[in-house]
Amino acid sequence: MTEHHPDGRAERRPDDRPRLSRRRLLGTAGAAGAAGLALGAAGGALGTAAATERPTALATVGRSRVPFHGTHQPGIATPLQAHGHLIAFDLVADAGRKEAAALLRRWSRAAEALMAGEAPPSRLHDTGIALDAGPSSLTVTFGFGRSFFDRTGLAARRPAALAPLPPFSSDALDPKRSDGDLWIQIGADDALVAFHALRALQREAAGTARVRWQMNGFNRSPGATPAPRTARNLMGQIDGTNNPRETDEDFERRVFVPADGDPAWMAGGSYAVVRRIRMLLDDWERIPLAEQERVIGRRKSDGAPLSGGSETTPVDLEKRTAGGDLAVAADAHVRVSAPETNGGAAMLRRSFSYHDGFRDDGSPDAGLLFIAWQADPLRGFVPVQRKLDRGDALSRFIRHEASALFAVPGGAGEGEYVGQRLLEG
């Protein structure tokens, strides 16, 4: 999934000038000092030094690179990163299809450079926030909301799968933090690299789209455990054990729109359901460990199902205790959400935790930035959430406070920008 970006490489722009990586520029400035920078302004000494200086090699985390181009956009099947930003935009009043296409071109060029560890080719001065960092597994993913198609005169090409999500009884949604014309998901294993991408893309939108809402998330950092492990959420539970895996025979069918799918411009794409789910952590932490495990249906220590085995052992929904009770309670989260109890419905959950300070009552404003990927939300998220809405023991401890659904087109080929098949088709 990742490839190592060789240190010191100079890519070529169309005008044949060398493009400086963030790290090469910093290393050059450090070696040349103030005098070197002054000479660079007068006679190109900075450019000459950049061609010969080689900075110190990056650590493993920094040099991990995810390709921008491909059948699918990055940030879907990519391993989950330690830092994430989600940001939605609305087109400004006089922006339409032409302006949206120009913005996606700029965004795609910037994302390609940033994911390669380069400064973005921009009409604006780069901030240099991540000047000394490598790619750090950065991914940038773009999506379109339902309203985008009305704003750009493309309502006839809007996918049927982008129909509004039905209301759920547990929803307490804030419309100001929901929906949006355009959406970007950013993930990276370095916080400054992630913020650099966020800032660069937000600046490129100026005059075409304005920020509607933005959310920040985090996960465990790479190398924090002796071996790679399934992530834990802020309740302390291992979260994501039953996720579809790329090695599954039906992974592509569950997660991505097929090549012959409808509409054709969504081939290789996916649909992202985004939910801001606040966890009532004070209430959760008051109940005993045994009750927490009963609510989830898994042991907290290692994620094993209460029916026995290890984390990856399939949940035995029929197993009973010596006293005759179901080992996994009838309203346990793992039972209610299991594909076996939802007609096989499944989705790829790729979420971030968040903490936005404290509420007026002193409780933490914290929880999960839930992101679910599927080929069709009407056959993935919706049936599962309807089932959870009717009888999930976990519902007592969470609040769904924001919601959005985005069509995420397939990846861009060399020389293409994301969404080109829609906007120019």
Image (cartoon, grey):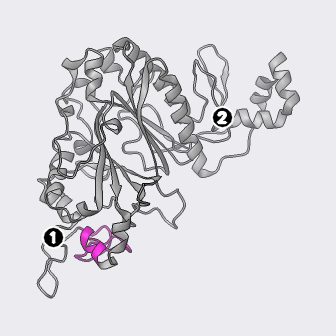
Which mark is first along the chain, 2 or 1? 2
Name the residue at 49% across, 40% down.
Answer: 66
Position above or below: 274 against 100? below
Position above or below: 69 against 219? above
Q: Is residue 380 visible?
A: no
Q: CA distance from mark 1 to mark 2?
A: 52 Å
Q: Nearer the viewer, residue 283 or 331?
A: 283
Judged by its main secondary structure, the magenta piece is: loop
Q: Secondary structure at mark 2?
A: helix
- Quarter holding the C terminus? top left
**Mark 2, residue position:** 22
On residue 317, which mark appears? 1
Horizontally, is 406 left or right of 50 in the view?
left
Is 90 colored magenta in this rendering? no
- Quarter holding the N terminus? top left
Density class for disc 1 (Cα within 10 Å; few <14, some 14-19, many ≥20) is: some
Name the residue at 19% across, 35% down.
Answer: 164
Is 301 colored magenta in this rendering? yes
Which residue, as the protein is rendered here, is positioned at the far front?
360
> Whole-percent x and y of residue 330?
14, 69
Position above or below: 41 against 285? above
Part of the protein shown in magenta: 291-314
Name the residue at 43% across, 49% down.
Answer: 79
> Whole-percent x and y of residue 401?
31, 47
